[in-house]
Amino acid sequence: MYGRNAGKLLREVACSESGHLTSFNNILFDKVIQDCSEHHLQLQSLMRKIQDQGLDIQTTRNSDHFGAVIHHLSLIRNKRCLMAYMNHRLEIIRSLRWKVGRELPEEIQQKLTQSERDYFKNHSLALESYMSELDLELTVDMVPPKDPYIQVRVLEDIGDVLLSSAQTTLLRHSVHSLRRSDAEPYISQGLMEEFLG
């Protein structure tokens, strides 16, 4: 109760591979919230007990006071651990927008809660709105390319698409020379790969 579950939650984050998202641990998260509720109830009970005895809460230094301090500090620690867990997950979710684009792969979506999916969607909309105001695609070419065109191999049938220069049919196993900015969204979705040889 005194921070054990919250510690387990943070150890899970520390043991996970950097930048990789694990499934949301509902069970442990709910246990920490339950611990917070229990600490809060104990804290209220001890504060009421001190008041009922007619003692000043600010100056009293008895066992009830120190018990209240322990519950208060445990409550704060648990809340900080919950916020650290959520902040870590949200940082990864924000970085996914830059790595994989607008659409999250199914294996990543399965690891997210509904509120995290909504967060990703709202973050993407805000980023797209900002980019449209600037008329600049910020998510392409995080490292400046040497050549604006790349050779790509199509991994799955995509069909007819309108690229910046012309309309093209992208069929499975075909190789094309495309502008990097046109190819990046398809590469990040796993529909094509850069063809190096």
Image (spheres, rainbow, N blue to C red):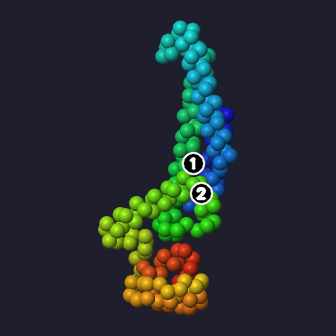
Residue in front for this viewpoint, 16 or 26: 26
Residue type at mark 2 is Leu
Quarter in which the N terminus is drawn: top right
Residue type at mark 1 is Tyr
| Residue behind mark 1 | 85
Q: Position of residue 40 (x, y in %)?
A: 58, 28
| Left or right: 159, with 144 as reference point | right
Mark 1, other Cα within 10 Å: few <14 / some 14–19 / many ≥20: many
Relative to 190, residue 26 above or below:
above
| Residue behind mark 2 | 112
Q: Position of residue 169 (x, y in %)?
A: 50, 89
Mark 2, other Cα within 10 Å: few <14 / some 14–19 / many ≥20: some
**Residue 72 lies in quadrant:** top right
Label 2 – label 1 distance at C-alpha = 13 Å
Q: Position of residue 45 (x, y in %)?
A: 60, 20
Res. 176 visible in picture: yes
